[in-house]
Image (spheres, rainbow, N blue to C red):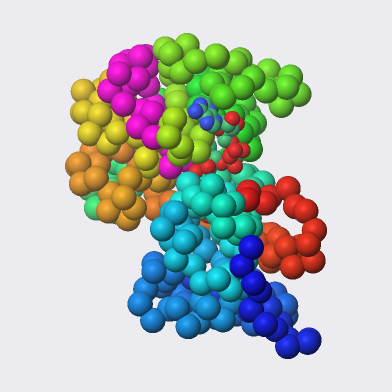
Amino acid sequence: MADAVSRAVGAKPRLFVTFSLPPEVRAVIADSFDAHYAEAPGALARPGTEPALAACELVLVTATDTLDAAAVAALPASVRAVATYSVGHEHIDLAAARARGLAIYHTPDVLSEACAEVGLLLLLGAARRATESIALVRGGGWQGWTPLQLNGWGLTGKRLGVVGMGRIGREIATRARAFGMDIHYYNRSRLAPELEAGARYHASAESLLPVSQFLMLACPATADTIGFLNAARIAQLPRGAIVGNIARGSLVVDEDLVAALKTGQVAAAGLDVFNHEPDIHPAYFDLPNCFMLPHVGSATIETRVEMGRLVIDSLQAFLRGEPRGNRLA
Ligand SMILES: NC(=O)c1ccc[n+]([C@@H]2O[C@H](COP(=O)([O-])OP(=O)(O)OC[C@H]3O[C@@H](n4cnc5c(N)ncnc54)[C@H](O)[C@@H]3O)[C@@H](O)[C@H]2O)c1
Ligand SMILES: O=C(O)[C@H](O)COP(=O)(O)O
């Protein structure tokens, strides 16, 4: 374990923050920490950052900061704990962090409901042709109501297949049930009956996909799931399926989804996350049946404040030497 930076008695612990935070969170941070805000993407790797970082024992990052093995190794010896303002942690090499004795925290649970709301927004926006509707109204081309105008597909009575029935997947299932959907899921392992809440478990993606009139991706990006939604799996969906991705862009092979949106194998897609954000695959922009949001799953004021509270609590617990459930390494 690296030595802590020396701290005068009574001095606040020093925290390096790579991004801007809501004012409510900044205020709470100011009560307990002496914070340095870099407020720019890629701050950890930027030349000139080193002196400020080397003065800190705690670091707060987001999912847009890469902490792979090389970046972990490059952290100044002063840094003892990192909290990520995200639940997803594929940007952090946990094994490298453990090997270096670096504590890592993330923000589970507090964002599940906000993300589930966006999950339903993705399904509704795709199924009810929101991209075309918004363009029609805003473009001034709307000529008034007709029976044939922009008819989409209802959620009621349809089967929803959830890939990854974790915290967010279960909140999506709860809301989709309220829309009259029949929930099926594929997960690494079967849930306990009380968590399943009547959803039907499938032991493989190959079993889930053929019944999924709607499909929601809600699992983490891992070596097993990157590229999950490829041409072969899309072909297993019922023709005209509707696909949502609330999880990570890397779960989808963009060229394959674009091809399926063109042929109608996938009738519509709702995407909150993308490969290579913010550089979205250009073909999506030509597809009126693609409903896109700019990674806003957890973007409510309440949730962002709660995420802030959780990272602060976590770092304070670290300093007190207390165990916490949201510690990853
Ligand atoms: N769009 C957004 O703004 C946003 C916000 C928060 C989280 N996310 C993403 O959502 C993901 C899920 O978050 P969560 O809190 O629900 O996580 P979670 O760990 O509670 O749930 C993930 C579920 O996926 C399952 N899973 C993992 N690997 C699998 C595999 N190979 N096959 C099938 N199932 C698998 C796990 O068993 C678990 O039940 C995060 O990892 C993150 O990438 C996106
Ligand atoms: O929406 C968010 O807050 C960002 O994606 C942070 O990462 P997450 O998606 O894992 O929470």
Tell me where residue 113 sits by quadrant.
top right
Tell me where residue 315 sits by quadrant.
bottom right
List x then y, in percent, for residue 321.
Answer: 78, 62
Let me know if residue 7 appears in the view: yes
What residue lies at 38% left-to-right and 28% top-to-bottom?
228
Residue 237 vs residue 82: left or right? Answer: left
Q: Quadrant of the N terminus?
A: bottom right
Q: Is residue 2 above or below residue 272?
A: below
Q: Is residue 253 above or below residue 202?
A: below
Where is ligand 1, by quadrant?
top right
Let me know if residue 19 appears in the view: no
What residue lies at 56% left-to-right and 18% top-to-bottom?
184
Total marks in image: 0
Instruction: Specify the segment rendered in magenta.
Output: 226-248
List x then y, in percent, for residue 251.
Answer: 39, 35
Q: Is residue 156 above or below residue 300?
A: above
In the foreground, 157 or 20: 20
What residue lies at 72% left-to-right and 77% top-to-bottom?
32
Tell me where residue 261 sits by quadrant.
top left
Taking the magenta stretch, the answer to whether it contains residue 247 is: yes
Taking the magenta stretch, the answer to whether it contains residue 74 is: no
List x then y, in percent, for residue 213.
Answer: 43, 19
In the foreground, 171 or 248: 248
List x then y, in percent, for residue 83.
Answer: 60, 61
What residue lies at 73% left-to-right and 48% top-to-bottom?
325
